[in-house]
Image: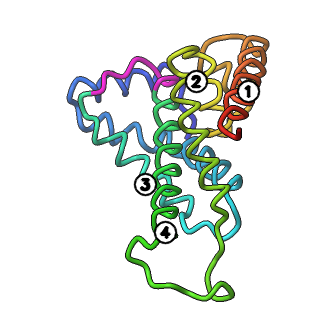
Amino acid sequence: MQASPHQITKLLNQWSNGNPSAFEQLMPLVYKVLHQMARRQMRRQIPGHTLQTTALINEAYLRIVRDSRKQWQNRAQFYGVAATAMRNVLVDHARARRAAKRGGGWQAVPLDEGISVSEERLTGLIALDEALTCLSRLHPRQNEVIQLRYFGGLSVDETADILGVSSETVMLDWRAAKAWLHKELGRHDT
């Protein structure tokens, strides 16, 4: 079912104002986009990742719903929050995996029996999260573009539509944010 941006915003506003049936109407309208965002994000993860697409959606959904005091402005904000929630789920999962690799109560398994997850990949995801947190303070729209394009997996045109800017603006923000992140992450490597 395809919903108009106005319809989604209207339901978000009703949900913010305490109408639980608005949320029930909203979820079928946004689930397809959320599933696409999660599926694209999971494709970027290492093979053998223990988190599945549906689990990522469900965990992100729980994080969104937990913040019941959220005042939704529009669908761009909602999809941005959803992309951030998915990112946070993946970062928390990476931190938990890293802690487990350091003896977090898990039983040792011989290398040939376990799934090897690179410490470097886990550390990289955490460093990316920290850099994105900094970017969100410095350049909020560039951060939104990264959230929607990288973590949400949306195209330039989809991102432009959601943010209400031109595709050219999205590309400028995308390039600037990637350059800034590359520089920032390079500092962490040294």
Q: How is the image coloured?
A: rainbow
Magenta-drawn stretch, dominant element (helix, strand or loop): loop
* Disc 1 secondary structure class: helix
| 112, 39: nearer the viewer | 112
Instruction: Name the residue beneath numbered marker 2.
Output: 144
Disc 1 residue type? Answer: Lys
Instruction: Name the residue beneath numbered marker 4.
Output: 102
Disc 2 residue type? Answer: Glu
Q: CA distance from mark 3 to mark 1?
A: 34 Å
* Disc 4 secondary structure class: loop
Q: Position of residue 21 (x, y in %)?
A: 27, 38
| 14, 187: nearer the viewer | 187
- Which residues are drawn in magenta? 70-77
Relative horizontal placement of residue 129, taking residue 85 as reference (left or right): right
Q: CA distance from mark 4 to mark 3?
A: 28 Å
Mark seen at residue 183: 1
Instruction: Name the residue beneath numbered marker 3.
Output: 58
Relative horizontal placement of residue 53, taking residue 60 as reference (left or right): right
Q: CA distance from mark 2 to mark 4?
A: 34 Å
